[in-house]
């Protein structure tokens, strides 16, 4: 069965400093991994996805993530945080088990706080 | 183009009442998913529809929960005899294909409060 674990429930950074949101996954298959962002009172938005192509994935708003099979990790990074990045971030794996429905399995989320 | 829409945006109901939540997927999307998000938590999968195939109901938490979808259009999620633990945001997502890691587009959700 697939699962994801977000290692930090809350991350606080200063504006202009790097962002690192950590995610480890567990999968019996070659996983498809995603990062979604949820701004307050707004819907979920896809930041980026990994689907077994390049291991370094670039997403929107300057975010990127690197798939590391040896470490079973898919950490999200951004070189310089902006105030507008403050939101809830979810690491997600797509269910590729029996039936292959494509349902998404979400981590518990990481709240990113950006201080001025 | 129009995204996924859901109605109502907010619903407050008394314990024991039935509620019906609606989802309008993106036109042409064959796959439709319902998820539940409890306060401060990630999303939990509830049910999946793909075209005219039998739905995957493996995520429904109890027999009080049911959902329908007619063809590739609107879906309704019904919760009977609501309980306080049903309070959550219910999110709908649609996708252009039912298998594989295709991007799911989420609606804004329905916030359900059971008093």
Image (spheres, rainbow, N blue to C red):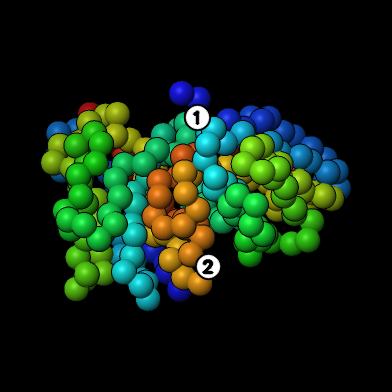
| Picture coordinates of residue A100, whole percent (x, y) | 48, 64
Please indicate whether residue A29 sits to the left or right of residue B57 in the image: left
Please indicate whether residue B113 sits to the left or right of residue A62 in the image: right
Which residue is identified by label 1?
A: B3
Q: Quadrant of residue B71?
A: top right
- Chain to which mark 2 belongs: A
Residue at position x 26%, y 69% from top? A72
Which residue is identified by label 2?
A: A99
Density class for disc 1 (Cα within 10 Å; few <14, some 14-19, many ≥20) is some
Residue at the outermost bottom position: A28
Please indicate whether residue B105 sits to the left or right of residue B78 in the image: left
> Front-most of A89 and A49?
A49
Kindly tell me whether residue A41 is visible in this rendering: no
Residue at position x 15%, y 37% from top? A80
Give above or below for B79 relative to A84.
below
- Chain to which mark 1 belongs: B
> Mark 2 to mark 1: distance in Å?
27 Å
Image depth: mark 2 or mark 1 in front? 2
């Amino acid at each position: 069965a697939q699962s994801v674990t977000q290692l930090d429930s809350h991350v606080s950074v200063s504006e202009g400093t790097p962002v690192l949101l950590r995610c480890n996954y567990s999968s019996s298959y070659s996983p498809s991994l995603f990062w979604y962002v949820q701004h307050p009172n707004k819907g979920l938005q896809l930041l980026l996805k990994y689907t077994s192509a390049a291991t370094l994935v670039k997403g929107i708003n300057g975010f990127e993530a690197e798939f590391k099979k040896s470490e079973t990790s898919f950490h999200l990074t951004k070189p310089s945080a902006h105030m507008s990045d403050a939101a809830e971030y979810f690491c997600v794996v797509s269910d590729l088990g029996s039936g292959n429905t494509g349902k998404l399995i979400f981590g518990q989320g990481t709240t990113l706080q950006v201080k001025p | 183009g129009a995204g996924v829409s859901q109605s109502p945006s907010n619903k407050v109901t008394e314990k024991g009442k039935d509620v019906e939540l609606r989802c309008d997927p993106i036109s042409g999307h064959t796959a439709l998913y319902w998820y539940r998000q409890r306060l401060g938590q990630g999303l939990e999968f509830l049910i999946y529809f793909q075209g005219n195939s039998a739905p995957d109901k493996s995520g429904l938490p109890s027999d009080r929960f049911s959902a329908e979808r007619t063809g590739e259009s609107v879906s309704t999620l019904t919760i009977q005899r609501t309980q306080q633990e049903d309070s959550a945001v219910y999110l709908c997502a649609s996708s252009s294909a039912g298998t594989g890691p295709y991007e799911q587009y989420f609606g804004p959700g329905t916030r359900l409060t059971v008093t």
